[in-house]
Amino acid sequence: MIFPMPTYRATSRVRWRALPTTPESPVVGPTLGSASAGRGKPRPYGRRGLWGGAALEGNGSGRGFRQRLQLGLWCLVLALGLGQPCRAAVGPIRYLLDLREPAAHLVRVTMTVPEAAPSTEFQFPAWNNLYQIRDFVRNVQELRASCDGQPEELERRDLNTWRSLPTPCANLELHYAVFAHEESPFSSSLDQDHAFLNFALLLFYLPQERARGVRVQFLLPEGWKLATVLEGEGADFQAPDYDVLADSPAEAGHFQEYNYTQDVQLPGPNSCSGGTGVSPVTVHGQDGRATSGGSSGRRRATYRVIVHADPADYSAGRLLASLEKITDTETALMRDVPFSRYTFILHFPREGGGGGMEHRNGTAISVPASQLRDYWESLEGVAAHEFFHLWNVKRIRPQALEPIDYVRGNDTRDLWFSEGVTSTYGELCLLRAGLITPQVFYARLAESVRALQERPARAFQSVETSGREAWLEKYPDYSRPERSISYYNKGALLGFLLDLAIRHASHNQASLDDVMRRLNEDFARPGRFFTLADLGAILRSLAPSYAGLDAFLREDVQGTHELDYDTYLAYAGLRLLRKTEEIPAWGFVAMRSFEGHIEVESVDPGSTAQKAGLQRGDVLLKMNGKPLFVLRDLLHSSYRPGQRVKFDVHRRQGDAVVEYALEGKEGTTYRVEELPHPTAEQRQVRVGWLRGTTGIVGAHGVRPVGGRAPLAPTSTIREGRP
């Protein structure tokens, strides 16, 4: 759902033209003239060409040429002596976004490339956020170019790529407009109320210079203000490269703004996690680079909450209270504050769907106002999931997701971990923060079991394959139970079971929490990416007695064996109760779309639903007069066979009402419950699992080895100006 190299030249006459970087043959080294030079952040560069991947072009004479020649010779000496590439300093790519045509939904963009090389290529992303090729170029119009103020013809290379003329240009400009009229956290929108901007849907990039710095400026309608995850102030912002830019959304309009801070207790060098040593935790700047650390103590985390909604539709106090509990619990779990400021961009529309999208230092979440009023827990659930993503997938990244391919997409086989295990922690952190009870946690776990067991596709599609085929989710029929399973659903279950297995094998001295912290320590902080083999190695080091690990990875992750719920749950003194009984036959299959709607995927032939006129593609708005927000509302309803239901539906031809009597069918219901007399070992695993601690259970609870109760956050609230 998200996602993550250069022209180097001295003057407009003598140019160092970068050749394509290949992931298969990167060279890592310092960047001369770059703000990041010497900071140790790995950067991939191509190895082609005498000049560290650059070709010297053009003719020149005089003192300037001699200086440039001296610079080139110096770089050659450096390259030969150190085996590292060299590039000359170039100015950042500049973007100007004009939002002053909200009624037309047009974002007008001027892109300026200083010191542009001959035949500079421009490319527009085909995907971002969702794992779907969405062809964003479809919204680009009125594209024209100029070189040093003179019109220039661009050569179109393919659907997403253009090329400038084979001559140098001191200032190459692109002018174009983007139609932005999709209200969701995964898209971009501009209207008379506000603008929400995902920059990968709006801005070209240079495929050979993605590592080049960028600056972004905005022209706003009168009276509007702007908030963005980007660094900067006023209307002038910057990013170290295009990937960071694409991962830093913005909100403009008349939003409300709140801020709070939290003091987070971080462990020292002698702290333990699951019986293993953990090195000192560092605090990071907004770009993710370490800025301080090396000792235990409290660190202050700053949070900004941007809300586009009618203030009458939500409680600021309740909103801040929920977010504080979530952020405090998760930073405590990870023992890490990898940002200087984290931004929540929240939309509570009175019409439309919802969803959430993670970003490296923020998130964008949309929840309908009526859903917020009737089902506040849905906001808390999305927030807990998206906030944990700031580690899992945004920093703890699978190798297969790097480098980001904005045109063809990436290998997404590891989404069971990046998304599924994030869902595991979304639920665990709600529990550990006190936002749900153990009984609710057990009920949701049982519902996850039911959701997987009712999908026949689990017999042939592994969770790894499910992730790899995420790109097919844009096709409605792919979601049929007979065709696919959900890597969210099964991945979350695997996370729960893996946590119980680690705790059992280590006698509750280690947990999945330790796995996440090790991945953060060993891979995220050094800028490395992990593989399934790396994950297995960490698991073996934390729980060497876990004899079934290889089988778990082979059969449950890469294979299609039935999950052994009973064995894993028994480790914690729990059992899964199954009951065969007559249950309602709704007569249709529905899925929650990425826009947040509950949409009918198929209707059972001959069912009362079909006879009443329900159709594939219908969006279910209400059930018996109550707004229908999540499938759980439908599946957990108390309706029995024979009762009548009435759906308000939306379809292309217009809204309609469908009413019919439910039929019955034989089905299995699931319930997770605690054993009345667990052993001491079972009890210690269960208490540690629910509370997020490791250690030995005594008469007074858990004597912790790792983990802690969340600190009470210190908070301040500031309302935004209207």
Image (cartoon, rainbow, N blue to C red):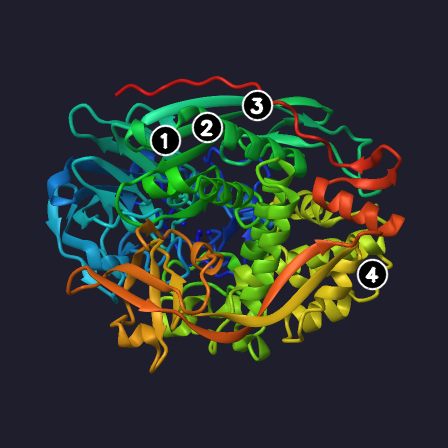
Q: Which residue is disc 2 drawn over?
A: 318
According to the picture, the residue beneath numbered tag 3 turns out to be: 262
Name the one closer to the observer, 47 or 398.
Answer: 398
Q: Which residue is mark 1?
A: 314
Q: Quadrant of residue 405?
A: bottom left
Residue corresponding to mark 4: 546
Within-10-Å neighbours for mark 3: few <14, some 14–19, many 20+: many
Circle 3: element type:
strand
Instruction: Tell me if mark 2 has few (under 14), some (14-19) or many (20+) residues whose alpha carbon lies within 10 angstroms of its own.
Output: few
- Tell me which label, 1 or 3, sits earlier in the chain: 3
The image quarter containing residue 533 is bottom right
Q: CA distance from mark 2 to mark 4?
A: 43 Å
User: Residue 593's x, y, as percent?
Assistant: 36, 59
Q: Looking at the image, which residue is at 60% across and 31% down?
A: 328
Question: What type is the residue that disc 2 sits on?
Answer: Arg
Kindly check if marks 2 and 1 are in contact, taking CB atoms under 8 A apart as contact. yes
